[in-house]
């Protein structure tokens, strides 16, 4: 047997072993090595990505630690091993196709209909009914009723809805690309259902809310489509804030957004993988851009704050992975998704800039707000 064929047989054995050790891993992403460059593109077989360098995982299959020219090992779904020149249409392609689980359409339908029905029920039953009408709320302006807190909420919430639906679809054996595509579409429809319901209540149909919902759902789609969920994400959280004193209180619409905070995160774990560096304990950290409002909509207008912040925080999902929560099990995947879209209180510290009053606040955990004399 030639050395080249020997390497191929060993690689086939590695592929079979990987399939037995981690069923479903191919659908979750896998890893691939192209030509002699041995470039690691992704890893999701339940262990840290750095363990899947060619030298680390293929030493027994490829004695010199590098793939020969024209050799391609691809453990995405369906996995392939190809011999020949070029990345497209190489000669002598061997396709290894593990059994495809039939998507559990009942659970997929239940999740989709449940999201739509829950959203519609919540909005159609929120207060006394009125004739259908529209409203113009604006976006993040100082004089909008919520200072943009509601729009940040819509963006992050529908990003979260899409992420959760994607996870439900994938654990129901829907292929990855179909999962995040369907999840994003259902999320947009869920936002539309909410606005149709709001159109029959005191709130009114807000096209700005629908735009924000769509931005959130589209963000989830783009990050999934380009494999960026381990690098970039959005989260929503609660933070303590004082009640508005009666002497400073005015009538407002809807909930008080003073105790909510929203973040756009850079995940150092994902960055470390992309630059091929060991960040040590820093991989458990996030660098975040935050947005929150104080006093909207129930404090006197001159006392309200719109706070844009920078903070460093704990990546709770990454901690959970290090502690052994399995990304390949359905329950582990759902847990990690929830941890990835929630900002937990007191897990971050940073500084904020109050746009309304042009002043810096902090360092704090996001809850600082004082009521000066009007």
Image (tube, grey):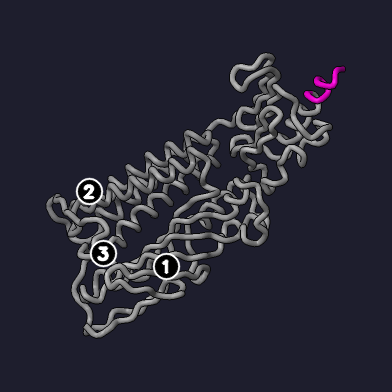
Give coordinates of residue 374: x percent, y percent.
Answer: 21, 82
Disc 3 or disc 1, which is closer to the eye?
Answer: 3
Q: Secondary structure at mark 2?
A: helix
The range drawn in magenta is 1-8
Q: Quadrant of the N terminus?
A: top right
* Left or right, 351 with reference to 332: left
Judged left or right of residue 20, residue 148 is left
Residue pictured at 48% horizontal, 56% vertical = 265
- The residue indicated by pointer 3 is 146
Q: Quick check: 239 left or right of 331?
A: left
Q: Quadrant of residue 239?
A: bottom left
Residue at the left extreme of this rendering: 131
Q: In screen coordinates, is 61 left or right of 98?
A: right
Q: Earlier along the polypeptide chain: callout 3 or callout 1?
A: 3
Q: Are marks 3 and 1 in contact (CB under 8 Å)?
A: no
Q: Is the C-beta separation of discs 2 and 3 under 8 Å? A: no
Residue hosting label 2: 207
Q: Main secondary structure of the magenta part?
A: helix
Above or below residue 39? Residue 324 is below
Find out whether residue 51 is within the magenta segment. no
Dividing the picture into quarters, in which one does residue 304 lie? bottom left
Query: What secondary structure is marked by label 1?
Result: strand
Q: Earlier in the sequence, mark 2 or mark 3?
A: 3
- Reading the image, the residue beneath label 1 is 238
**Does residue 12 appear in this view?**
yes
- Residue 24 shows in this picture: no
CA gap between label 2 and label 1 equals 26 Å
Considering the numbered disc 3 on the image, is that residue within a helix, a strand or a loop?
A: loop
Label 3 neighbourhood size at 10 Å, few (<14), some (14-19), many (20+)? many
């Amino acid at each position: 047997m030639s050395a080249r064929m020997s390497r191929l047989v060993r690689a086939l054995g590695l592929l079979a072993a990987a399939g037995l050790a981690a069923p479903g891993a191919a659908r979750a992403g896998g890893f691939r090595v192209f030509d002699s460059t041995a470039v690691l593109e992704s890893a999701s077989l339940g262990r840290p990505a750095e363990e899947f360098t060619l030298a680390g995982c293929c030493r027994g299959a490829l004695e010199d630690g590098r793939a020969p020219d024209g050799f391609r090992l691809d453990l995405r779904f369906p996995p392939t091993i190809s011999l020949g020149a070029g990345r497209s249409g190489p000669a002598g392609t061997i396709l290894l196709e593990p059994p495809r689980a039939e998507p559990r359409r009942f659970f997929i339908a239940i999740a989709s209909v449940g999201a739509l029905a829950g959203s519609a029920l919540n909005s159609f039953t929120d207060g006394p009914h009125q004739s259908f009408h529209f409203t113009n709320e604006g976006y993040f302006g100082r004089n909008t009723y919520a200072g943009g807190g509601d729009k940040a909420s819509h963006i992050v919430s529908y990003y979260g809805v899409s992420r959760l639906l994607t996870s439900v679809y994938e654990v129901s054996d829907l292929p990855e690309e179909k999962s995040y595509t369907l999840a994003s579409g259902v999320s947009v429809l869920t936002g539309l259902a909410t606005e149709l319901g709001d159109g029959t209540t005191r709130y009114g149909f807000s096209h700005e809310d629908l735009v924000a919902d769509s931005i959130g759902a589209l963000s989830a789609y783009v990050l999934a489509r380009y494999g960026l969920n381990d690098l970039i994400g959005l989260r929503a959280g609660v933070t303590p804030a004082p009640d508005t004193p009666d002497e400073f209180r005015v009538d407002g619409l809807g909930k008080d957004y003073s105790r909510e905070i929203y973040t756009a995160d850079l995940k150092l774990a994902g960055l470390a993988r992309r630059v091929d560096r060991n960040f040590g304990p820093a991989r458990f950290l996030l660098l975040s851009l935050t947005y929150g409002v104080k006093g909207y909509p129930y404090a006197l207008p001159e006392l309200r704050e719109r706070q844009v912040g920078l903070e460093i925080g704990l990546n709770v999902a990454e901690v959970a992975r290090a502690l052994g929560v399995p990304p390949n099990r359905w329950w582990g995947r759902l847990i990690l998704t929830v941890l990835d879209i929630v900002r937990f209180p007191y897990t971050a510290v940073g500084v904020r800039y109050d746009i309304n009053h042009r002043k810096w606040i902090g360092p704090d955990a996001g809850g600082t707000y004082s009521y000066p004399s009007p």
